[in-house]
Image: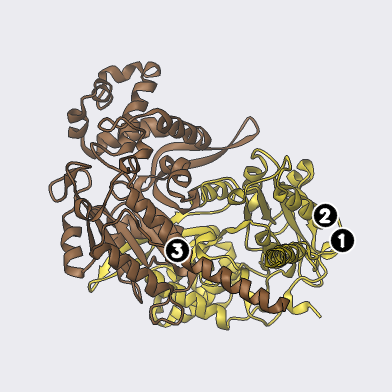
Chain colours: A yellow, B brown
Amino acid sequence: MRRYLLMTITLAAVLALASLAAAEPLPSWNEGQPKRAIVDFVQRVTTAGSADFVPMPERIAVFDNDGTLWAEKPMYVQLAFALDRVKALAPTHPEWKDKQPFKAALEGDLKTVAAGGEHALLELVMATHAGMTTDAFAQVAKDWLATAKHPRFNRPYTELVYQPMLELLTYLRANGFKTYIVSGGGIEFMRPWTERIYGIPPEQVVGSSIKTRFELSEGKPVLVRLPEINFIDDKAGKPVGIHQHIGRRPIAAFGNSDGDLQMLQWTAAGNGLRFALIVHHTDSEREWAYDRQSHVGRLDKAFDEAKANGWTLVDMMKDWKVIYPFQQE
Amino acid sequence: MRRYLLMTITLAAVLALASLAAAEPLPSWNEGQPKRAIVDFVQRVTTAGSADFVPMPERIAVFDNDGTLWAEKPMYVQLAFALDRVKALAPTHPEWKDKQPFKAALEGDLKTVAAGGEHALLELVMATHAGMTTDAFAQVAKDWLATAKHPRFNRPYTELVYQPMLELLTYLRANGFKTYIVSGGGIEFMRPWTERIYGIPPEQVVGSSIKTRFELSEGKPVLVRLPEINFIDDKAGKPVGIHQHIGRRPIAAFGNSDGDLQMLQWTAAGNGLRFALIVHHTDSEREWAYDRQSHVGRLDKAFDEAKANGWTLVDMMKDWKVIYPFQQE
């Protein structure tokens, strides 16, 4: 008797789990091609015995961050951080008052900063991201994110994440995927908060980095951040970063700009069923609308490739019921 | 009634799991200080409510590979691989017959190779590890390991792994630890087989690397291995590699040589309870005995630090019932 009850209960538990997994996924996604394509892909790679079945350890999904998981307008969040850090550090750098690009940064003159090009940005990043231990930098990044507000929405930047993408991360993980961030942004700028906001632990974050050096400081081991580029995890760097960190090819990749093109190509070209998706920013009211002409998050070549290769294109205005969690009723 | 039965069955399941976890761990370890220290550490960090409790995501354990998880005598396995590759590639490199260190490598003259120092070794590695795609290299490494035999034991190198360390890896994972390799060896030389042999997936392998470049080869995306050092994951490089790949500090570290010293220091200096262990090669009969004077796997400074800091020292002869799995009855 007890044995039958046990079987009944086990069966009930299995059914409960199955129904949980089958519960309507992606509630903030409108019915449409992108949602259907995602669900179809996940069902095919997770159905045992199917020709497209992928064993769990190989279910690797990679996500760009800026413009794919959270907002990148009016400027990259990390640039806002660097500009605020210049202001915070200015009292100990009196020379910055007369020296570009620091002068412009201190005056809030973004045009002049931008006119300095990549070199100016690099100078700002090096001056604000190096010269302290890794522990100290993580704390600075955490403290800033706890207080800084997005200029348009007047909310912490970590609230400017896309609700439909949070649901997608959860849905993939519920189906045995390991979710990674693969971003052009600084790896150590992201790691202090990605676990809390996205459920992605530090070891699953790939990003750009500066070099660090191991030192004994008064007998205590520290890692000191050096003003020297280690790795740029953008464009052709993304497959390289994926290979370095993960060591196997993803089966699904999610991006929004030309910076993600090579990551999408690398993922899509693997053996077996693969999934590539691009978030197209089409919603000027709830978010921003931009693509081929944008300086930040330009979507041009990758747009053409998506169409040519049949990658999934998300139209944010049409496909997403809400953009940010705070816009939910 | 059914409810009580459910509770009973749940309780039974919990007890069964608990007894499974409590089953005599580390059967190939003799009773003694190292085994007691390991079990005590694991119990303290996994006991909820204990002052030393560590949440599961933070239970990171790092293992050196050569000399800690598998044999490194009479030479690093990867050097044996490089020497065999020189022989295999020689027909397409007629110039090697008259050029050092290739000439010596082809003649099996290890003394001359060694006399060339690091530079000669680097030349051999670059000539044999670069110039192909990452996929091609993984296949070459896999094929070699499937056929090459250890000169003393006449068995595949992957059988020269330490049975007590395999048990330790399993024991830690059963207690919620994430186990990583952090090795001076080549990351792409290890990744093709660490999951099968150690249960450690590619994304949990940290090692030395050469640079790679993303290319479209006849429209197909590939990563090409370049003859240029990217990162040396040895000595002061180990904490740097840990930080790059894992992004948080381990709570336990396992090594066997001075190359592991900084990894052990970095781990041991973290907040809360930490565990540092050194495998001391003391068994000239079943394995090899070496420490302060050895060229490969020298244990000198780290030996002194282990004693000064109370790190756990494993005496292989005394503490291990068997060394290799094939030595088990």
> In which quarter of the view is residue B288 placed?
top left
Identify the element where label 2 is drawn. Answer: helix
Say if mark 3 contacts mark 2, CB within 8 Å: no
Q: CA distance from mark 1 to mark 2?
A: 7 Å
As drawn, which residue projects farthest toward the left?
Answer: B293
Q: CA distance from mark 3 to mark 2?
A: 37 Å
* Residue sitting nearer the eye, B52 or A238: B52
Numbered tag placed on residue A31 in the rendering: 1
* Residue sitting nearer the eye, A227 or B69: B69
On what subunit does the disc labeled 2 rest? A
Q: CA distance from mark 1 to mark 3?
A: 41 Å
Residue B141: x %, y % from top left: 43, 34
Q: Are marks 3 and 2 on the same chain?
A: no
Instruction: Point out the frontmost of discs 1 and 3.
Output: 3
Tag 3: residue type? Phe
Q: How many C-alpha atoms fall within 10 Å of the one at disc 1: few (<14), some, or many (≥20)?
A: some
Numbered tag placed on residue B268 in the rendering: none
The residue under label 3 is B177
> In which quarter of the view is residue B128 placed?
top left
* Residue sitting nearer the eye, B133 or B66: B66
